[in-house]
Amino acid sequence: MKLEEFFKEAKKDYLGVKPPERVSLYGWLELREKLDKRLGLKDVLVWFFVRPALAIALAVVLLVGGGAGLIRAANGSLPGDSLYPVKRTYENIASAVTGNHEIKVEGRANEIIILSQKEEESTERLKEAVIQYQMTVAQVEEKVNEEERKSLKETLRRQKREFERIYEKSRSRDEIKKAIEAADDDEDEEDVKSWEDEHKEEDSRRD
Amino acid sequence: MDDEVGEHLARAKAGDNDAYGKIYNLFLEKIYRFIYYLISDADTAYDITQDTFIRAWKALPRFDRNRGSFSTFLYTIARNLVIDNQRKRVAFTLDLDLVGEVKYEENFEESIDAEERSKKVRKVLKSLPKFDRELVVLRYFEDMSFAEISKIVGKEEGAVRVRVFRILKGLKEKFGENI
């Protein structure tokens, strides 16, 4: 093999290297979470000084209602709300203590359902909720053992049916479709396809 | 692709995470492959790939397209992180034979051919010093210009040109006309 040919062959070998499937699927979601988490002292200070009303409200809730009150207040929060990080932190603690990771998946699915039903809501918040759901499903799928996986699959199937139900009335069908795909496991691929075909005609009429 | 990157960059610079996600998806495979070929470990390659994009995100406000392409910018960060990683490893030896589990998209017969081909290729590449291997990857696999490579490796363009010429000469001397 001549040197030129060698480089051609070597290039083929090099280009044959692909990231693992997991990286292609979830690499960005994992990175996005890291980008969001990297809040420095500066960001915290800005948050407190630029949004003093929220900071005061948070302080009042803490003082008057105590921890339980805060958690109750945070419980109904949605992505983008000021108390949302409190809800997520509480969930993380509850999930770590009880070993029930599905709490998180349930939480994210409920947020999608609530946001999709709010008429005044912007697509952006729903988009964010779907991203959070995709990420949570991927993370929980990695954590669960065989026994828990069965239960998780059941939960995801139920959520998939819920998403399919709201898909009909949703103004952001693309986002709901992403949630359906995230809730879907491989075994259900055929079902999704036939379900998509069912709605394709209706979609084109709408467009 | 440059226009596409430019559009996403402008939005990402303004803090749009999703635009940066588009950039990530455009460059993920290339950056991962570059790192993986130099580091020979899938998990480490993934970690360094993610760190590359985090660093690039942080440095985005300072990034100036007039001083070089975004691609060059990413490769420079990736290369620096690979060097940092290698420094941290005690008695690190890059063994390209260990670059296993390469995923090919061909069928079985083709994958056997590919395996033999890659063994031969890696044997030759393994014989090169680390820096020379980087130059070969950038020049012959990534098809970069000497100007781009010089920015990535932080050497004068002329010096890179001479080094690549010497690598070729060395390979010819070592393996003859037919490798």
Image (spheres, rainbow, N blue to C red):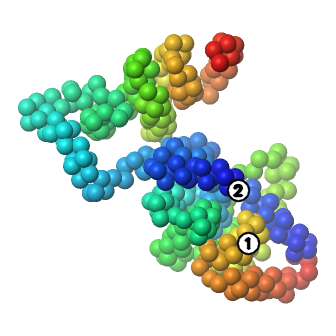
As drawn, the label of residue B57 is none
Q: In the image, are marks 1 and 2 on the same chain?
A: no
Q: Give coordinates of residue B48: x percent, y percent.
A: 53, 61
Which residue lies at the image location 58% right of the left edge and 49% below the top edge?
B8
Question: How many numbered badges does the structure rendering display?
Answer: 2
Nearest to viewer (mark 1 / mark 2): 1
Measured in 3D between alpha carbons, the distance from the residue under mark 1 to the one under mark 2, in whole angstroms, is 22 Å
Q: Mark 1 sits on what residue?
A: B145
Residue A67 visible, this angle: no
SS assignment at label 2? loop
Q: Is residue B63 left or right of residue B30?
A: left
As drawn, the label of residue A17 is 2
Going by the numbered disc 2, the residue's amino acid type is Val
Q: Pick whichever, A153 or B62, lies toward us.
A: B62
SS assignment at label 1? loop
Q: Give coordinates of residue B154: x percent, y percent.
A: 59, 79
**Among the 4 quarters of the image, the one containing residue B159:** bottom right
Would you call the spot at circle 2 few (<14 residues within 10 Å), some (14-19), or many (20 or more)? Answer: many
Quadrant placement of the C terminus of chain B: bottom right
Would you call the spot at circle 1 few (<14 residues within 10 Å), some (14-19), or many (20 or more)? Answer: few
Which residue lies at the image location 52% right of the left edge and 19% below the top edge?
A171
